Amino acid sequence: SMPVEKGIRAVRLMSAMAAVNDIVASDGKLPFGGYLTLGTCVDSIALVQQALVGTTSMYPIMLHGVYKSEMFLSLEKFRRAARAEAEKCATRGEDDQLVPALIALSKALLELPCDVSVEPSEILFACERIIATLPPKSPFACVRLAIERAEEAR
């Protein structure tokens, strides 16, 4: 059924994303396994959501600059290695799903917004994600202000 297939695809994407996060964090010797630097908590989910449905509702997406580039390069390197392995598997009649997952993640990464520096053309989309993601009642003044400004901008 469709929901089961989508769930399986989501797990494949999350597994591939976890492996790529680990590659980038290990290669870059990032502290905490790259947790803060790579935006592991929100950004990975946003990237998988982008790959699954073509958009994301997550906020804030912090992955940018050199580490976003490193993530893309690692996805591409992993994809090439997985494709070579898949070609071996194809001769044995095995089905490979890793390569399509990595291709989807690479495409999604190129489309993923960045909330560190929001372009004017992305302001309304960022505001929609702020309103959809941040808690409407927060003890933090900065969160309340962000929601208030986002609602004004809509």
Image: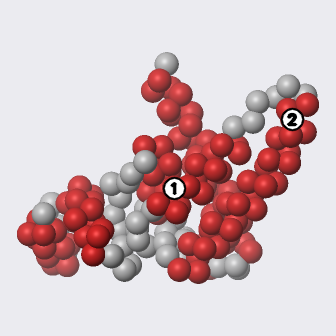
Asked which secondary structure carries label 1, the reply is: helix
Q: Are marks 2 and 1 in contact (CB under 8 Å)?
A: no
Answer above or below: position of 29 versus 131.
below
Give the mark nearer the N terminus: 2 vs 1.
Answer: 2
Q: Is residue 2 left or right of residue 85?
A: left
Q: How many marks?
A: 2
Residues 125 and 21: in front is 125
* Residue at the image point whose x is 50% and y is 32% from the top: 6
Answer above or below: position of 133 versus 25.
above
Kindly identify the amino acid type of the residue bearing the numbered disc 1.
Ala
Estimate the x, y position of residue 78 in percent, counting from the top left. 75, 57
Residue 134 showing in the rendered view:
no
Residue 121 showing in the rendered view:
yes
Estimate the x, y position of residue 38 in percent, counting from the top left. 54, 71
Tag on residue 89? 2
Looking at the rendered image, the quarter that the C terminus falls into is bottom left
Asked which secondary structure carries label 2, the reply is: helix
* Residue at the image point whose x is 59% and y is 80% from the top: 66
Estimate the x, y position of residue 63 in percent, counting from the top left. 49, 72
Given the current orientation, which residue lies at the most extreme top position? Answer: 1
Estimate the x, y position of residue 115 in percent, counting from the top left. 36, 73
Task: Report which residue position mark 1 lands on.
Answer: 108
